Amino acid sequence: MQTIDILVATTSGNTEYLADQLSTQLQEAGYSTTLHYEPDYSDLMESLTEQSVWLCCVASHGAGEYADSMLDFAEELHTHKPQLSGLRYGVIAVGDSCYDTFCAAGRDCDAMLAILGAKRLITHLEIDMSQDDPDEKSSTWLHSFIQLL
């Protein structure tokens, strides 16, 4: 059974809740999941294989920064710039469109993983917490993500 690592960047807990829901849906579809509420760079790099799949659920905080739970991981990714050619991934960016930095951290995560050679399975999803139903929007996107695994 394939394991999908779900990396979570959250401050208020909304993105954590969303990641939990996605994890359940992936398990119901026959996948194993590992939730990383505070992704650890060293652990994730050590466990990386040709079969690795990351689902990044990334909330933007403040002026478009990564939420606290993923800040260290993102900084290490930018600093070390590891080769990620064996990794496949998807990104769900969460934000509020009333800010001009809407989903900036999720967009950055998507761009950085692609620059480092990871294979994007599907265009990233942007969820506007002030307008969208996160469960409905992410479930529709996840169905497409699963089809591409």
Image (cartoon, rainbow, N blue to C red):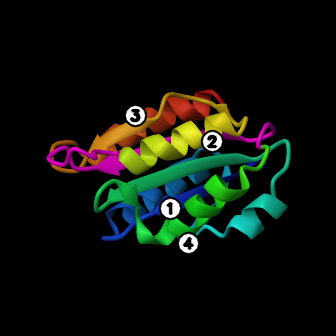
Residue drawn at x 76%, y 43% is: 84
Q: In the rendered image, which quarter contains the C terminus?
A: top right
Is residue 21 inside the magenta stretch? no
Local packing at callout 3 (Cα closer than 10 Å; few below 14, some 14-19, many 20+) is: few
Q: Earlier in the sequence, mark 2 or mark 1?
A: 1
Residue beneath label 2, please? 113
Task: Residue 132 in the image: state x and y as whole percent.
Answer: 21, 42
Task: Kindly check if marks 1 and 4 are in contact, taking CB atoms under 8 A apart as contact.
Answer: no
Q: Earlier in the sequence, mark 3 or mark 4?
A: 4
Checking the image for residue 8, the label placed there is 1
Task: Kindly check if marks 2 and 1 are in contact, taking CB atoms under 8 A apart as contact.
Answer: no
Which element carries disc 1, helix, strand or loop?
strand
The answer for how far apart the CA atoms under marks 3 and 4 are is 26 Å
In this rendering, the answer to whether 113 lies above or below 32 is: above
Residue beneath label 3, please? 140
4 or 93, which lies in front? 93
Residue drawn at x 48%, y 71% is: 69
Q: Which of the two discs, 2 and 3, sits closer to the camera?
A: 2
Residue beneath label 4, please? 38
The answer for how far apart the CA atoms under marks 4 and 2 are is 18 Å
Which element carries disc 4, helix, strand or loop?
loop
Q: Is residue 86 left or right of residue 88?
A: right
